[in-house]
Image (tube, grey):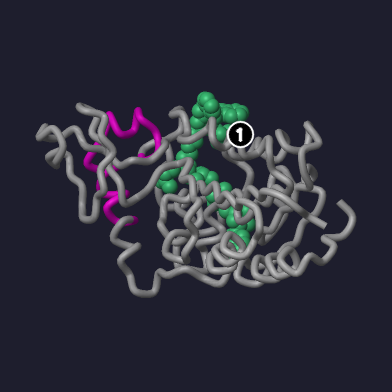
Amino acid sequence: MIQGPIVILTGAGISQESGLDTFRCAGGVWSRHDLEDVATPQGYRRNPALVQAFYNDRRRQLEDAAVRPNPAHLALARLERDWPAPVLLVTQNIDDLHERAGSRAVLHMHGELRKGRCEACGRVLEWAGDMTVESLCPACGKAGRVRPHVVWFGEVPLEMERIFQALDACALFLSIGTSGHVYPAAGFVAHVRERGLAPTVELNLEPSQGASLFHQAFYGPASDVVPRFVETVLTGDDLGPV
Ligand code: BJW
């Protein structure tokens, strides 16, 4: 039986049934856009307008009434509410579906679509509409220095210290809807496993890159496997051999 803090890593797969594309699945974001162009600092320096347009489109998508939390997001919010110890959600996603589902302890390690960052004054800003290469920073007033508050390849992900502290103290590590291609997130399971810190469980549509490192795995759509797994944890049922 699990007792104590839970750390959950989520990726694009958890939001797929909410209408947001994953990156590496067939028809995913990287099949339509070159990641070197839109998800690297070099790409941004080459063509900031292209990158702003890419994130503007994705920010607008969040406004679509059809894009809303699915049963997987809701189940994780319930877990945080009903579990007697801390539940920390570490998400690679830049959407806000965990928050909309009611989760409160959420760390966005790859940033947030609804935030911008001023490269002149360093302030992180709430950002609702489009961002352009001429946008003014509401904090310092400079024009053309606001960029999406997201983490591109080669940049350091956010909140790493808090994440590793939580991993070191967890009683269960859960990975949901991520392909395990992108580090450091892909390395969390090895961090927990190598130190014998906690059982590690993968919930995904298919085995991820790091599948062999998980003690247990349940495969299927997140809206199905996540609520069922949360129910098992909350009722205190044995997770099986770990
Ligand atoms: C479903 C489903 C359903 C589908 N239900 N499941 C060589 C070795 C090791 C590392 C490196 C290396 N060369 C370079 C690196 C570092 C690099 C890296 O990892 N590169 C790899 C490609 C090799 N990493 C970095 O540069 C990172 N920074 C860094 O390492 O800094 C150094 C440092 C670290 C720590 C401390 C100090 C210093 C930064 C990475 C930034 C990634 N940014 C992006 C874009 C963010 C903004 C945006 O959204 O546009 O983040 S890339 C993109 O990939 C995005 C995602 O968060 C990330 C992960 O993708 P995710 O979520 O796993 O999605 P998919 O599509 O890959 O998978 C979806 C999964 O869902 C699949 O498995 C499906 O089966 C499943 N699924 N439907 C359940 N209904």
- Could you say where residue 35 lies in the image, as x and y percent from the top left? 43, 40
Residue 44 pos. (x, y %): 30, 34
Q: For the stretch drawn in magenta, what is the main secondary structure?
A: helix
**What amino acid type should be assigned to the residue bearing mark 1?**
Gln
Q: Is residue 190 positioned above or below 220 on the image?
A: above
Residue 115 highlighted magenta (yes or no): no
Q: Is residue 16 left or right of residue 49?
A: right
Which image quarter is the N terminus in?
bottom right
In the displayed structure, would residue 126 be above or below residue 154? below
In the depicted structure, whether residue 211 falls above or below residue 166: below
Q: Which residues are magenta?
A: 38-58
**Residue at the image position 51 percent from the left and 56 percent from the top:** 22
Q: Position of residue 155 (x, y in %)?
A: 43, 29
Magenta residue check for 57: yes
Give the image quarter of residue 162. top right
| Camera-side residue of 215 and 177 | 215
Q: Quadrant of residue 133?
A: top left
Q: Name the residue at 78% across, 65% down.
A: 236
